[in-house]
Amino acid sequence: MQKQGIKFNKDFGQHILKNPLIVNSMVEKAALRPSDTVVEIGPGTGNMTVKLLDIVKKVVAMEIDTRLVAELQKRVLGTPLQHKLQIIVGDAIKTELPFFDVCVANMPYQISSPFVFKLLLHRPFFRCAILMFQREFAQRLVATPSDKLYCRLSVNTQLLARVDHLMKVGKNNFRPPPKVESSVVRIEPRNPPPPINFKEWDSLTRICFSRKNKTLGACFKAESVTSVLDKNYRVHCAANGIDIPADFSMKEKVKNILETGDFKDKRARSMDIDSFLLLLSQFNTEGIHLA
């Protein structure tokens, strides 16, 4: 996924959520069941972990900081909760996620975007995730067409999941206070997911949002775009026994598709998911694949 221009606080993993009311609220919003397995990313010293362990069958805590792992182990050692806790030491992005029903996390902000999509492409499906993010990142997740923060992240996330903003969390709820405000969102994957090739969808939105304020006609006119589409189209034609005219022009073909669907003068910032789905379908119908 492309970076969305957010300035992440790279030290956020050292900021521990201290307010028990926020912890309790996040746990409550997860609507946990006694039979659930919960994955918690970045448990820190375990303020939320012990709350989760009181309710569910199992908690898998993923933590990269070995010092915090030691604190968490010490906290449950010799208690009835010990056998319900599994700790995975490592990077949540590079480590395979285990089976889980619910994910609850106070996210390290520098991995927010890649983790969201790792989560949404995870199988088997989970029920929901309650995640705390940098405020602006959370606002991008829930943004709608024509909103100032509406972007490729918004479209790609909302294609695969329902996203709801649950609450704002101020800096003083952490120890020490970070430089940024936070928000908690609920993510519920769409099951079944839309019947499309997500790699193609991702390529489409990357092109459309490459110049957010430009028309799609301008975005698809770029030589770097048409050359890739031309190559993909020739592969498609060769595989399906389709002859390509000697005077074939990918730029003209793309222009005709955009004009036929009334997309040429539209801008990505004002298009909803159905519009992007229609555009992808029209490209595919004409034998053009974006990945």
Image: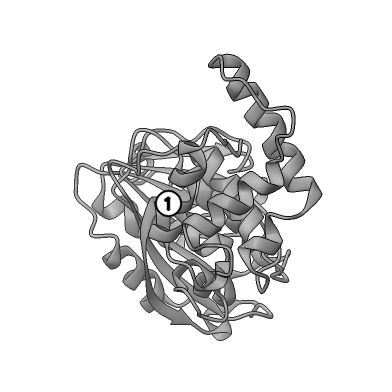
State the residue position of label 1.
277
- How many callouts does the rendering have? 1
Q: Quadrant of residue 290?
A: top right
Q: Residue 119's x, y, as percent?
A: 47, 45
Q: Is residue 18 left or right of residue 130?
A: right
At mark 1, the secondary structure is helix
Say which of 29 and 278 sits in front: 278
- Residue lying at 59% horizontally and 24% vertically, measured from the top left: 236
Q: Give 7 or 271, whichever is nearer the viewer.
A: 271
| Residue at image location 53% in from the left, 16% down from the top | 240
**Residue 197 percent location from the top left of the image:** 47, 36
Kindly identify the residue that appears in the image at 69 percent across and 70 percent down: 6
Where residue 256 appears, as percent x and y from the top left, is 58, 51
Q: Is residue 57 above or below residue 48?
A: above
Front-most of residues 290 and 148: 290
Residue 62 in view of the camera: yes
User: Is residue 13 in view?
Assistant: no
